[in-house]
Image (tube, rainbow, N blue to C red):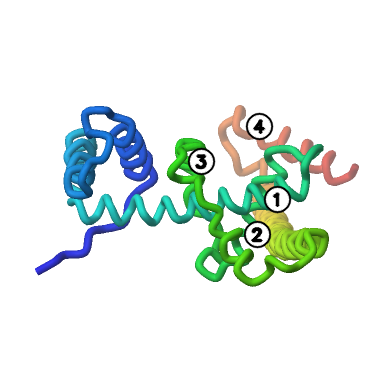
């Protein structure tokens, strides 16, 4: 009976992708290795290099995980190229990748965003992960007859709308966080004021006990003098 493995952690993804790259570039694997031979090498190398506390991953598991990552990397690479085509100069790398991620979220399969930032730099330039523009293939089949200016304008509007929507979501969350922080600060201030009043009431009661002490009833001259000085201090403080 097949048992479903648990999800991959960030460190597992990073090791698996590094192993995949190494095996792909290793001449020992052969120029045209069979599928079984290739994924068998990935499975063996990964499990030999993994941390002892990590789950053992079979061939089916590592192959499926790489394909999920590969699809997401290809998609984002395609989005990056489309954004670069709209901004031939003057746009920073950070701006381009952020716009590309917003464009990616227009795809129903990636509406929750890109989840593989931890291996993006490792894989984005690997030829197999960037040689197909899946977004372009899909759009070419339906819009090849449209003037290039209209296509660019529509794409730019779609990117801008996605980016605006993402920024509104971030702003909404930031506003909510500010509200919670302000409320938390006000609650702490109120608690401090309550505690301060309680301490003052307690201090006032203690001082009253001292003021009402009968000095004539105290036999020890040192204690009597101390109480007398405290009574004077309290009266001076309250008269200010």
> Is 213 displayed left or right of 46 in the figure?
right
The numbered mark at residue 124 is 3
In whole angstroms, how far apart are the C-alphas of marks 2 and 4? 79 Å
Q: Is residue 39 above or below residue 167?
A: above
Whether the residues at callouts 2 and 3 have beta carbons within 8 Å, the answer is no
Give the mark, 2 or 4, whose residue is nearer the N terminus: 2
Which residue occupies the foreground of this view, 173 or 22?
22
Give the mark, 1 or 4, whose residue is nearer the N terminus: 1
Let me know if residue 74 appears in the view: yes
**Is disc 4 surrounded by few (<14), some (14 to 19) or many (20+) residues within 10 Å?**
few
In whole angstroms, how far apart are the C-alphas of marks 1 and 4? 83 Å
Which residue occupies the foreground of this view, 238 or 89?
89
Whether the residues at callouts 1 and 4 have beta carbons within 8 Å, the answer is no
**Secondary element at image label 1:** helix
Residue 235, picture quadrant: top right
Name which residue lies at 56% across and 48% down: 77
Given this view, does label 1 or label 2 mark the residue nearer the observer?
1
In whole angstroms, how far apart are the C-alphas of marks 3 and 4? 81 Å
The numbered mark at residue 103 is 2
Residue 86 in the image: x percent, y percent? 76, 50
Name which residue lies at 46% across and 38% down: 126
Given this view, does label 1 or label 4 mark the residue nearer the observer?
1
The numbered mark at residue 226 is 4
In whole angstroms, how far apart are the C-alphas of marks 1 and 2? 9 Å
**Secondary element at image label 3:** loop
Let me know if residue 205 appears in the view: no
């Amino acid at each position: 009976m097949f048992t479903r493995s648990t999800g991959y952690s960030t460190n597992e993804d990073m090791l698996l992708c590094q192993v995949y790259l190494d095996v792909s570039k290793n001449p020992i694997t052969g120029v045209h290795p069979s599928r079984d031979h290739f994924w068998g090498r990935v499975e063996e190398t990964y499990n030999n290099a993994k941390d002892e506390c990590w789950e053992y991953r079979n061939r089916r598991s590592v192959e499926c995980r790489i394909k999920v990552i590969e699809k997401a990397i290809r998609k984002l690479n395609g989005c990056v190229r489309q954004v670069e085509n709209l901004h031939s100069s003057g746009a920073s790398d950070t701006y381009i990748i952020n716009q590309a991620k917003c464009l990616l979220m227009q795809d129903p399969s990636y509406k929750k965003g890109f989840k593989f930032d931890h291996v993006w730099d490792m894989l984005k330039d690997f030829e197999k992960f960037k040689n197909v523009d899946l977004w372009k293939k899909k759009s070419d089949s339906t819009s090849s007859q449209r003037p290039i200016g209209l296509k660019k304008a529509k794409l730019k509007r779609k990117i801008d709308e996605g980016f605006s929507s993402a920024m509104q979501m971030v702003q909404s969350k930031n506003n909510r966080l500010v509200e919670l922080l302000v409320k938390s600060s006000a609650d702490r201030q109120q608690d401090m004021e309550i505690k301060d009043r309680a301490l003052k009431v307690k201090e006032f009661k203690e001082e009253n006990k001292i003021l009402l002490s009968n000095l004539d009833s105290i036999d020890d001259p040192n204690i009597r003098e101390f109480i007398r000085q405290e009574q004077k201090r309290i009266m001076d403080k309250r008269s200010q």
